[in-house]
Image: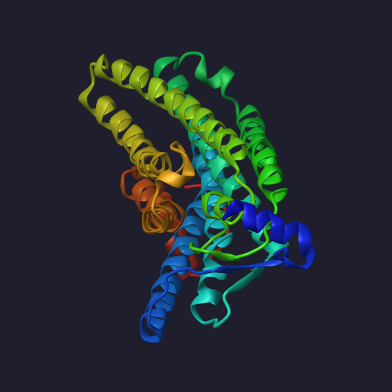
Amino acid sequence: MNLGKYLLLVTDPMNISDEFILLGFPCTWEVQIFLFSLFSVIYALTLTGNLCIICAVWWDHHLHTPMYILLANFSVLEMWYVTSTVPNMLANFLSETKTISFSGCFLQFYFFFSMGTTETFILSAMAFDRYLAICRPLHYPTVMTVQRCIRMGACCWMCGFSCFLLPVYLISQLPFCGPNTIDHFLCDPGPLMKLSCMPTPGTEIICATFNSVLIFSTFLFIISSYTLVIRAVLRVPSAEGRHKAFSTCGSHLAVVSLFYGSIMVMYVSPTASNPAGIQKFVTLFYSVMTPLFNPLIYSLRNKEMKEALRKLFRNVIFGQIKPLKN
């Protein structure tokens, strides 16, 4: 079959695909309308929740600390993360063709996975911040200054958008000569490589190795940081101090568990081992549902954030949009 595709590519270069069809979730028109409505609401709630956290950190001077600056960065990332896929998915629910251009597909591929990579770095930076604050409290004010925190956040963004250039380049160089239907709702590397006219074991191994190194290195760093944090917290004599520390770290660990649990299912093993249905639903969970849950996790378990949001809503209702000092 692969030899036939290759001969077709050589004898008829015009057969090279210049667009793809994102199959998405094939179902009846009524179900498509229901899914469109459902994900429209989820998208709006996700943007609203993360925007509230950003505004609370921006306007409340008490939250101008490294932990909340990183959290605001995380919320900005989550807004762009869902925006890289959900609007196109919503358009496909109402479209008959469900097509995406070659360049559009790889742009979505690049931005979606670059932001996913950035998320692993920002979660690692947040874990390091909590480690310094709890395990090295005397050094924390001098080591983790606001300026250094901003530089760390900028480094996370730059590294995240640099790391995925190689996998995107390798897959974009593969010959695609039909069929051009991607059994997914986004341009994912696994389904894309299956559409190649030629076998791609080398590219699959490189991508799987890259994903494994990235995911496990950041995951082990985060788990090591929180292990040291938990050991330090257990030695705190004050029950109130232990509760506050566990509450903050519990929020971070919940987000880490949701994100890493789903991406490990997807990208640590070679792509061919995951059925299309599992790929779509696991990707849907970590790319659409976790950005919805994260603002709830951080706001419900954090007294300072709840108080800042309460002040923000009160000021918005009474028309006093200004920095919150009290």
The structure residue drawn at horizontal position 45% and vertical position 61%, both measured from the top left corner, is 46
Q: Residue furthest left?
A: 239
The answer to whether one can see residue 61 in this image is yes
The structure residue drawn at horizontal position 50% and vertical position 69%, both measured from the top left corner, is 23
Q: 124 and 276: which one is in front? A: 276
Q: 317 and 77: which one is in front? A: 77
For residue 319, side relative to residue 305 (left or right) = right
The answer to whether one can see residue 64 in this image is no
In the image, residue 211 above or below residue 24: above
In the image, residue 83 above or below residue 272: below
For residue 6, side relative to residue 179 (left or right) = right
In the image, residue 220 above or below residue 46: above
The image shows residue 85 at horizontal and vertical percentages of: 55, 62
For residue 259, side relative to residue 198 (left or right) = left
The image shows residue 102 at horizontal and vertical percentages of: 70, 62
Q: 7 and 21: which one is in front? A: 7
The structure residue drawn at horizontal position 60% and vertical position 26%, both measured from the top left corner, is 145
The image shows residue 208 at horizontal and vertical percentages of: 52, 36
In the image, residue 52 above or below residue 200: below
The structure residue drawn at horizontal position 43% and vertical position 50%, both measured from the top left corner, is 308
Q: 305 and 172: which one is in front? A: 172
Q: Residue furthest bottom?
A: 30
For residue 294, side relative to residue 215 (left or right) = left
